[in-house]
Image: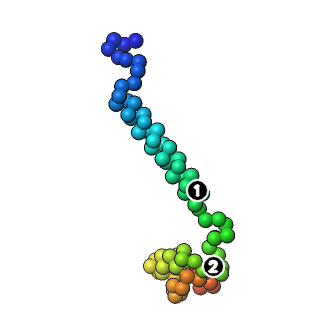
Amino acid sequence: MIKGKSIFASKEQKTDLRKGFIRKVSAGLLVLTLTLSLPSGSLAVGKGAHRPDIFVLQGMLKSLGSYAGTINGYYDDVTQGL
């Protein structure tokens, strides 16, 4: 044992360990929550779909100049033809 060094954790070290543990548990819960909240395969984007996500997709593509159709929220031939 080194003179003047304790083998026990100090208050600061215990606090740091608790904070680290809480961060890891919080991150794990966040990952679990996000994983369970992901849409199922039935909500996939494909021809014939009509969802708010399609509005967003069409809007983003239009702002990039890659979509010339109207933003209608339908994944149709115009959207698919990209």
Residue situated furthest right in the rendering: 42
Q: Secondary structure at mark 1?
A: helix
Label 1: how many residues lie within 10 Å, few (<14), some (14-19) or many (20+)? few
The image shows residue 76 at horizontal and vertical percentages of: 62, 84
Seen at 65% across and 81% down, the residue is 48
The image shows residue 22 at horizontal and vertical percentages of: 45, 41
Relative to residue 29, is residue 71 depicted above or below? Answer: below
Residue 61 seen: no
The image shows residue 3 at horizontal and vertical percentages of: 33, 11
Residue 53: image quadrant is bottom right
Amino acid type assigned to the residue bearing label 2 in the image: Ala
Per the image, the residue denoted by label 1 is: 35
Per the image, the residue denoted by label 2 is: 49
Seen at 44% across and 79% down, the residue is 63
Amino acid type assigned to the residue bearing label 1 in the image: Thr
Q: For the residues carrying marks 1 and 2, which lies nearer the camera in this image?
A: 1
Gap between marks 1 and 2 measured at Cα: 23 Å
Residue 22 seen: yes
Seen at 50% across and 43% down, the residue is 25
The image shows residue 65 at horizontal and vertical percentages of: 47, 80
> Along the horizontal axis of the image, is 82 left or right of 24?
right
Q: Secondary structure at mark 2?
A: loop
Relative to residue 53, is residue 40 depicted above or below? Answer: above
> Along the horizontal axis of the image, is 36 left or right of 61?
right
